Image (cartoon, coloured by chain):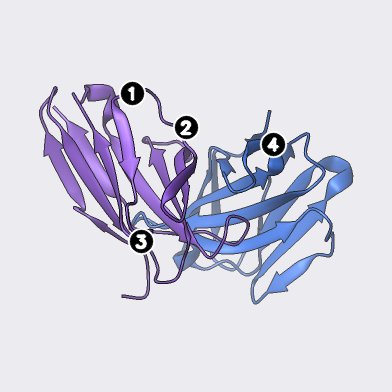
Chain colours: A blue, B purple
Amino acid sequence: AQKVTQAQTEISVVEKEDVTLDCVYETRDTTYYLFWYKQPPSGELVFLIRRNSFDEQNEISGRYSWNFQKSTSSFNFTITASQVVDSAVYFCALSGKETSGSRLTFGEGTQLTVNP
Amino acid sequence: GAGVSQTPSNKVTEKGKYVELRCDPISGHTALYWYRQSLGQGPEFLIYFQGTGAADDSGLPNDRFFAVRPEGSVSTLKIQRTERGDSAVYLCASSLSGWTGKFFGPGTRLTVL
């Protein structure tokens, strides 16, 4: 079965600090996709990134970066120089052929609070 | 509009009533999904449409839940004989295909009294 674990329920940082959100996944698929979504207080899930299982290169987008390590089944998300607007719940998700290929299995989410 | 839209944004109903929740996907997106999110939890998959047909409905909790997408665009999630446990935010998402990034709507908050 597929499973996504986000061990950090809540994280609180002060503005400008770097913060890393952890994500560990389980799947029997050899082909799968990993995702991160942001859910601000308004409630709408915002797509941040999709990564396929064959591409282990780290990715950077502005202040956001993602570290994918197949050896440890992890797909961690780092925000550099955090800002108050980064405060949200962040979800890691997984999809693979085991569950029709398009069905997302979400973690429980990490509530990030960035204090001024 | 450019994004996924859902109506109504809020729905309050009484136990035992029937409700319909509507989703308008992004134009041109053939894949459409329904998820349910309870307070403090991650979204849980309900059903996935590819075009007009339900490609995967294994997430529907029981036969009180049903969804349609008759013309391959707008979808309606229907819940019969609502129960208090059905209270949640119902999220709709769409994507170009099953494997591409999924874009979510703002959700419908359903409260069953």
At label 3, the amino acid type is Ser
Point 32% across, 45% down: residue: B68
Element type where label 1 sits in the image = loop
- Sequence-first disc among 1 and 3: 1
Point 61% across, 39% down: residue: A8
Disc 3 target residue = B73
Element type where label 4 sits in the image = helix
Assess whether mark 2 and mark 1 are in contact (beta carbons under 8 angstroms).
no
For the residue pair B64 and A10, the one nearer the viewer reads as B64
To which chain does the residue with label 1 belong? B
Disc 1 target residue = B63
Point 46% across, 66% down: residue: B29
Judge the density around disc 4: few (<14), some (14-19), many (≥20) Cα neighbours within 10 Å: some
* Front label number (4 vs 3): 3
Judge the density around disc 1: few (<14), some (14-19), many (≥20) Cα neighbours within 10 Å: few
- Cα distance between the residues tagged 1 and 4: 24 Å
* Front label number (1 vs 2): 1
Disc 2 target residue = B59
Disc 4 target residue = A98
To which chain does the residue with label 4 belong? A
- Cα distance between the residues tagged 4 and 2: 14 Å
Left or right: B111, with A38 as reference point: left
* Front label number (2 vs 3): 3
Q: Position of residue A95 (x, y in %)?
A: 64, 46
Quadrant hosting residue A6: top right
At label 2, the amino acid type is Gly
Q: Position of residue A16 (x, y in %)?
A: 59, 68
